[in-house]
Amino acid sequence: MIGRMAAPEELRGLMRHWPHGVSVLTVDYEGDRMGVTVSSLVSLSLDPPLVGVSIGKEASCYELLRRAGTWAVSLLGGEQRELAQRFASGRPPIVHWDGVGVHEGQLAPLIDGAVGWIEARTRAEHDAGDHTFFIGDVVAIEHGPAKSALMYRESTYHRL
Ligand SMILES: Cc1cc2nc3c(=O)[nH]c(=O)nc-3n(C[C@H](O)[C@H](O)[C@H](O)COP(=O)(O)O)c2cc1C
């Protein structure tokens, strides 16, 4: 039918079968730190290097991310499922960080043991329905020690 929009469950229902890599987006704004599990990370441009993430407007990190204007993503390794669960749990930040190994990036904390890390400075924020799509200029790239990557498909984590 022309002009019909799909229902939210239809999009979710299909995309849950499509595997996504899992990262944790981290923000530090004047010492306030938050992290959130994301599967929406995308590499957008090489020259200049740009990445994007789509963040729910209701996400607890949302305002901090907008205020900070800078962020990092830790690309999780295949053995880091518990970290993904922790940063998707909606628990208060203090619980998130308890016992999590991090090292300091230029712009935000980076989660130890990942496949790698990308740090970015927001260049544009696009309204995307119940999410905002953040496009960032890549400021720093680093490779980590993880030999496999964490994937998510049909509500289950997989090692690839
Ligand atoms: C595998 C996975 C991928 C996710 N990807 C995103 C994402 O790209 N953007 C987003 O806003 N939330 C994403 N979420 C949801 C957040 O991780 C989190 O659960 C949600 O923001 C609620 O927690 P909060 O109240 O602490 O924000 C994802 C969750 C999971 C488990």
Image: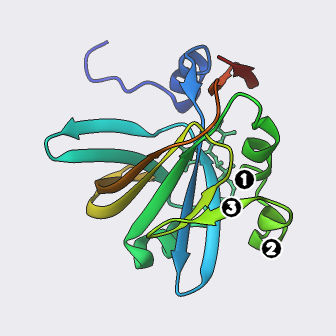
Q: What residue would you read off at disc 1?
A: 87
Ligand 1 neighbours mark 1 (CB distance < 8 Å)? yes
In this view, which residue lies farthest toward the bottom?
Answer: 30
Q: Is residue 47 left or right of residue 32?
A: left
- Give me the residue at 44% from left, 24% from top: 6
Chain-order first, disc 3 or disc 2: 2
Q: CA distance from mark 1 to mark 2?
A: 11 Å
Percent across and percent down for residue 14 are 55, 16
- Where disc 1 sits, the SS reads loop
Q: Is residue 156 left or right of residue 9?
A: right
Chain-order first, disc 3 or disc 1: 1
Q: 10 Å neighbourhood of mark 1: few (<14), some, or many (≥20)?
A: many
> Mark on residue 102?
3
Q: 10 Å neighbourhood of mark 3: few (<14), some, or many (≥20)?
A: few
Closer to the camera in the image, 2 or 79: 79
Residue 109 in view (yes/no): yes
Percent across and percent down for residue 56 are 52, 54
Q: CA distance from mark 3 to mark 1?
A: 14 Å
The vertical placement of 54 against 122, above or below, is above
Q: Locate residue 18: give its quadrant.
A: top right
- Where disc 3 sits, the SS reads strand
Task: Specify the amino acid type for callout 3.
Answer: Val
Q: What residue would you read off at disc 2?
A: 94
Q: Locate residue 49: give its quadrant.
A: top left
Percent across and percent down for residue 76 are 63, 38
